Image: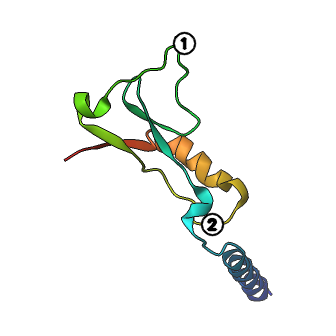
Amino acid sequence: MKKKKFTFIILITLLIIIFISLLLQPTSPTTFNKECILDSCDCQCYLKGKITQQESVTVCKTDCKQLFNIVGCEYVGIQCPYGITGCAIVDALNDLFISKQCEIVKGK
Protein backbone atom coordinates (compact mmCIF):
# COMPACT_ATOMS: atom_id res chain seq x y z
CA MET A 1 0.00 0.00 0.00
CA LYS A 2 2.85 2.40 0.85
CA LYS A 3 4.51 1.72 -2.51
CA LYS A 4 1.33 2.66 -4.37
CA LYS A 5 1.02 5.96 -2.45
CA PHE A 6 4.68 6.76 -3.00
CA THR A 7 4.42 5.98 -6.74
CA PHE A 8 1.26 8.08 -6.99
CA ILE A 9 2.95 11.06 -5.28
CA ILE A 10 5.99 10.77 -7.57
CA LEU A 11 3.73 10.60 -10.64
CA ILE A 12 1.70 13.64 -9.58
CA THR A 13 4.90 15.59 -8.83
CA LEU A 14 6.31 14.78 -12.28
CA LEU A 15 3.07 15.82 -13.97
CA ILE A 16 3.09 19.14 -12.10
CA ILE A 17 6.71 19.80 -13.11
CA ILE A 18 5.93 19.00 -16.76
CA PHE A 19 2.87 21.25 -16.67
CA ILE A 20 4.85 24.15 -15.20
CA SER A 21 7.68 23.73 -17.71
CA LEU A 22 5.17 23.77 -20.59
CA LEU A 23 3.40 26.80 -19.15
CA LEU A 24 6.63 28.77 -18.68
CA GLN A 25 8.11 28.48 -22.15
CA PRO A 26 11.13 30.75 -22.51
CA THR A 27 10.64 33.76 -24.72
CA SER A 28 12.91 36.56 -25.73
CA PRO A 29 14.43 38.49 -22.80
CA THR A 30 13.11 41.65 -24.45
CA THR A 31 9.85 41.02 -22.58
CA PHE A 32 11.81 42.10 -19.50
CA ASN A 33 13.70 45.08 -20.83
CA LYS A 34 15.68 46.67 -18.03
CA GLU A 35 17.59 49.77 -19.01
CA CYS A 36 20.44 51.46 -17.19
CA ILE A 37 21.01 55.20 -17.45
CA LEU A 38 24.09 57.26 -16.65
CA ASP A 39 23.33 60.11 -14.25
CA SER A 40 25.25 63.15 -15.45
CA CYS A 41 25.39 64.58 -11.92
CA ASP A 42 27.36 61.84 -10.16
CA CYS A 43 28.48 59.73 -13.17
CA GLN A 44 26.85 56.62 -11.68
CA CYS A 45 24.53 54.14 -13.35
CA TYR A 46 20.94 53.61 -12.23
CA LEU A 47 17.97 51.59 -13.43
CA LYS A 48 15.73 53.69 -15.65
CA GLY A 49 13.18 55.38 -13.42
CA LYS A 50 15.36 55.16 -10.32
CA ILE A 51 17.74 58.06 -10.93
CA THR A 52 18.29 60.13 -7.80
CA GLN A 53 16.20 63.26 -7.52
CA GLN A 54 18.03 66.50 -8.23
CA GLU A 55 17.88 68.96 -5.34
CA SER A 56 18.65 72.01 -7.44
CA VAL A 57 16.67 73.25 -10.40
CA THR A 58 19.72 73.25 -12.66
CA VAL A 59 20.36 70.06 -14.58
CA CYS A 60 23.83 68.56 -14.23
CA LYS A 61 25.97 68.39 -17.34
CA THR A 62 29.10 66.65 -16.06
CA ASP A 63 31.23 65.26 -18.88
CA CYS A 64 31.67 61.73 -17.51
CA LYS A 65 33.71 60.62 -20.54
CA GLN A 66 36.27 63.38 -20.20
CA LEU A 67 36.54 63.14 -16.41
CA PHE A 68 36.33 59.39 -15.78
CA ASN A 69 36.38 57.77 -19.26
CA ILE A 70 32.80 56.54 -18.69
CA VAL A 71 30.91 55.98 -21.94
CA GLY A 72 27.69 54.47 -20.63
CA CYS A 73 26.00 51.78 -18.57
CA GLU A 74 24.99 48.16 -18.99
CA TYR A 75 22.40 46.02 -17.23
CA VAL A 76 24.06 43.13 -15.36
CA GLY A 77 21.13 41.86 -13.29
CA ILE A 78 19.22 38.65 -13.93
CA GLN A 79 17.20 38.81 -17.15
CA CYS A 80 13.71 37.35 -17.09
CA PRO A 81 13.50 34.77 -19.90
CA TYR A 82 9.77 34.18 -19.47
CA GLY A 83 6.74 36.02 -20.69
CA ILE A 84 5.41 36.41 -17.15
CA THR A 85 3.60 39.68 -16.56
CA GLY A 86 6.05 41.90 -14.74
CA CYS A 87 8.53 39.10 -14.07
CA ALA A 88 7.94 39.74 -10.36
CA ILE A 89 10.04 36.82 -9.10
CA VAL A 90 13.08 37.93 -11.11
CA ASP A 91 12.62 41.52 -9.89
CA ALA A 92 12.54 40.30 -6.29
CA LEU A 93 15.68 38.18 -6.78
CA ASN A 94 17.51 41.12 -8.33
CA ASP A 95 16.50 43.42 -5.48
CA LEU A 96 17.47 40.90 -2.79
CA PHE A 97 20.68 39.39 -4.11
CA ILE A 98 22.18 41.75 -6.68
CA SER A 99 23.30 45.00 -5.12
CA LYS A 100 24.30 46.71 -8.39
CA GLN A 101 22.13 45.78 -11.36
CA CYS A 102 23.77 48.46 -13.49
CA GLU A 103 27.49 48.73 -14.15
CA ILE A 104 29.59 51.52 -15.63
CA VAL A 105 31.06 50.96 -19.09
CA LYS A 106 34.42 52.64 -19.58
CA GLY A 107 35.99 53.56 -22.91
CA LYS A 108 39.06 51.79 -24.20
Quarter of the rendering containing residue 45: top left
> Residue at left 76%, top 83%?
2
Q: How many marks?
A: 2
Q: Which is closer to the viewer, label 2 or label 1?
A: 1
Q: Residue at x 66, y 77 (%)?
A: 21
Task: Name the spot of residue 90 as percent of width and height, x first.
Answer: 59, 53
Q: Which residue is mark 2?
A: 82
Labels 2 and 1: the sequence-earlier one: 1
Residue 91: percent from the left, percent from the top? 60, 48
Q: Label 2 amino acid?
A: Tyr
Residue at (54%, 12%) from the top-left corner?
57
Label 2: few (<14), some (14–19) or many (≥20) C-alpha neighbours in 10 Å: some
Question: In the picture shown, does residue 66 fall above or below 17?
Answer: above
| Residue 94 located left or right of residue 60 | right
Q: Which residue is mark 1?
A: 57
Q: Is residue 43 shown above or below 106?
A: above
Residue 93 lies, in percent from the top left, at 56, 49
Q: Residue at x 55, y 40 (%)?
A: 48
Nearest to the observer: residue 70 or residue 76: 70
Name the element at disc 1: loop
Q: Residues within 10 Å of mark 1 (few under 14, many from 20)?
A: few
Q: Residue furthest left?
A: 108
Going by the numbered disc 1, the residue's amino acid type is Val
